[in-house]
Image: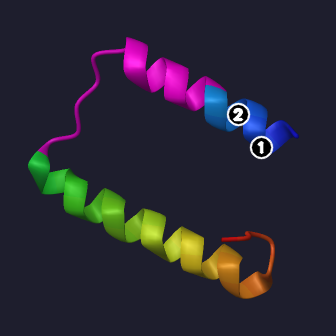
Amino acid sequence: MQVIVVAILGMILGLLLPVTIPITYARYTAVALLAAWTRSSASGSLTT
C-alpha cells in the first residue's frame, strides 16, 4: 500500500516539476534502475 502511494506521489511530482535529466546521466539512471529492479526481482519482493 505504501509503495503505491509513494509511486503515485512520485509520478505527480515528476509531471509537475520541470526537472530534466541530462543525456549523460540518463544512461546511468537507466542502468541503476535496471540493477535495482533485477536485485529486488531476484529476492522475490517485486512482482512483474
The amino acid pointed to by label 1 is Val
Q: Residue furthest top?
A: 16
Q: Nearer the viewer, residue 29 or 48?
A: 48
Quarter of the rendering containing residue 20: top left
Q: Is residue 47 above or below residue 19?
A: below
Reading the image, the residue beneath label 2 is: 6
Q: Is residue 35 above or below residue 28?
A: below
Quadrant in the picture for the C terminus: bottom right
Please tell me whether residue 14 belongs to the stretch shown in magenta: yes
Residue at the image position 12 percent from the left and 54 percent from the top: 24
Q: Position of residue 31 (x, y in %)?
A: 35, 70
Mark 1 and 2 residues: CB-CB less than 8 Å, in contact? yes
Residue at the image position 14 percent from the left and 42 percent from the top: 22
Reading the image, the residue beneath label 1 is: 3
The amino acid pointed to by label 2 is Val
Element at label 1: helix
Please tell me whether residue 1 belongs to the stretch shown in magenta: no
Q: Which residues are magenta?
A: 9-22
Q: Position of residue 46 (x, y in %)?
A: 73, 69
Quarter of the rendering containing residue 42: bottom right
> Disc 1 to disc 2, how far (Cα)?
5 Å
**Number of numbered discs:** 2
Q: Nearer the viewer, residue 24 or 18?
A: 18
Labelled disc at residue 28? none
